[in-house]
Amino acid sequence: MANPATSCEPKSLISLVHAQRRSVTEAEEAAKLVPFDPFSRADLVLYMANAGKIDTAIEWLEESIRRDASPLGWYFGNLAFAYYRADRPADAVTTLQKMVHPWYSTLAAAHARLGHVNEARAGVETFLQEKPGWTVGKEAVWPSTK
């Protein structure tokens, strides 16, 4: 069976759209169960961002960072990814720079979108040093860029 995340077959694309809609619905329902839990919302936002609910993803993450006394590093990684998806690459770069271990593939993509070619190359080089053998195909399967 074709991977719906990387396939252009109509059946696979329709399957992906339905899966994303279901993911949004399930994420929204889960958030209702624990409306003030920053960890849960921060964890659910990639489903929202990947399904096109980017404004909601950003809102949830910004709120999670405000509510959590010690927000985990990946909160910032998820927020940077959402900023990138919202065509806010400068915000993505600024957010990633707050991390002890930035997500270098997202950092490289944000720098590339800003036209910072040297910084983008450096980000890719660091990413590949940390994850030798990583491919674009692997990135397509899990676009959170972790």
Image (cartoon, grey):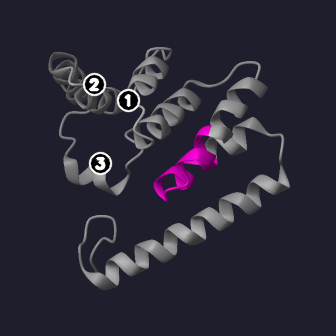
State the residue at coordinates (23%, 73%): 8
Lateral position of residue 58 relative to residue 63, left or right: left
Residue 90 position (above or below residue 7): above
Q: Nearer the viewer, mark 1 or mark 3?
A: 1
Give the residue number, with chain letter if any, for mark 2. Answer: 111
Q: Amino acid at mark 3?
A: Glu
Circle on res. 139: 3
Q: Amino acid at mark 1?
A: Pro
Which residues make up the magenta segment? 44-58
Question: Element type at marker 2?
Answer: helix
What is the C-alpha distance between the residues marked 1 and 3? Answer: 19 Å
For mark 1, what is the residue?
89
Foreground: 21 or 141? 21
Q: CA distance from mark 2 to mark 3?
A: 18 Å
On the image, the x and y values in percent for residue 58 come to 59, 39
Residue that protrudes farthest toward the bottom in the picture: 11
Mark with earlier residue (2, 3): 2
Which disc, if any, is residue 80? none
Residue type marked 2 = His
Find out whether residue 20 is within the magenta segment.
no
Q: Secondary structure at mark 1?
A: helix
Instruction: Quadrant for the C terminus, please.
Output: top left
Q: Position of residue 27 (x, y in %)?
A: 67, 58
Question: In terms of sequence position, does the residue under pointer 2 or pointer 1 come before the other?
Answer: 1
55 on left or right of 35: left
